[in-house]
Structure formats: C-alpha cells, structure tokens
Image (cartoon, rainbow, N blue to C red):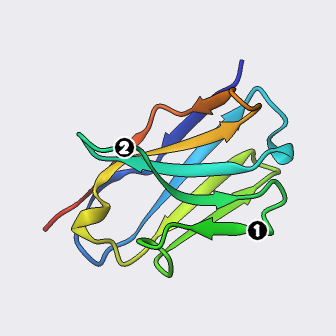
Amino acid sequence: QVQLVESGGGLVQPGGSLRLSCAASGFTFSSYAMYWYRQVPGKERELVAYINSGGGTTTYADSVKGRFTISRDNAKNTVYLQMNSLKPEDTAVYYCKVRLGAVNHVWGQGTQVTVSS
C-alpha cells in the first residue's frame, strides 16, 4: 500500500526555521519525483517545491525561492523540506505528493506549519 507520512510541522516565530519530512512506503521511492504543496483554508493547494527522482533537479515557487530547500534521501525513502526565514504568510498545511501515473497522485495527510509571534 502506497503511503506518505509528513512530520516536522509546528509553531515557529517569524524568521525561524523548520524541517519537514515525508516518509514514503509501498513504491520504489528512488524512481519517482516528489513534490511539496501547501494549502490555506479557502485557497487552492499551491506547489511549493519539486525534486526529481535522483535529486539533481529542483524547482521552487517564487514565493519560497532562496528560503526553502527540497532534498531527498533515497536510502531512507524520505523527502525533506528545509524552511528558513519563515514568514507569517508561510502558514499553511504542507503536503507531500508522489505522481505514480497520469491520474494516480498520492498525497500525505499533511502537517500544519504556523508562523506567528
């Protein structure tokens, strides 16, 4: 059974850092690109970062470029999102996703990140 489990969210002050993790199971992790998205109530889910299967290619939303870093450890079947210089507008539920096929997208349950003083 394909499963993605996010962790690492929490409450942090503006300017602080968090590292999110997404542990994957049930598929050949090293063969697939991975994605981080975020969503706030009433808004569409937003793509935050992408990493290809080997980890050599990454892309970021303009809003997080230079502050967030996506990485992966294929030996641990885990993808990470290092978030630095956090802002209140980064507050959201963060999800990881794998696209196993054209219409087969699997999501984790999400982890809440709140940036507030």
Pinpoint residue 117: horizontal percent, then vertical percent. Answer: 13, 68
Pinpoint residue 45: horizontal percent, then vertical percent. Answer: 41, 44
Establish if 63 lies above or below 53.
Answer: below
Camera-nearest label, 1 or 2: 2
Does the residue at mark 1 contact the one at mark 2 (Cβ under 8 Å)?
Answer: no
Of all residues, the one furthest to the top in this rendering is 1
Establish if 113 lies above or below 17.
Answer: above
Q: Amino acid at mark 1?
A: Thr
**Residue depicted at x 54% and y 51%:** 36
Nearer-the-camera pick, 104 or 26? 104
Pinpoint residue 110: horizontal percent, then vertical percent. Answer: 43, 38
Nearer-the-camera pick, 97 or 109? 97
Of all residues, the one furthest to the bottom in this rendering is 66
Crowding at dot 2, Cα within 10 Å, few <14 / some 14-19 / many 20+, comes out as few
Pinpoint residue 3: horizontal percent, then vertical percent. Answer: 64, 27
Q: CA distance from mark 1 to mark 2?
A: 25 Å
Q: Which mark is residue 44?
A: 2
Q: Amino acid at mark 2?
A: Glu
Q: Quadrant of the N terminus?
A: top right
How many marks are shown on the rendered structure? 2
Q: Which residue has dot 1 on it?
A: 57
Is residue 84 found left or right of 105 in the rendered image?
Answer: left
Classify residue 12 by image quadrant.
bottom left
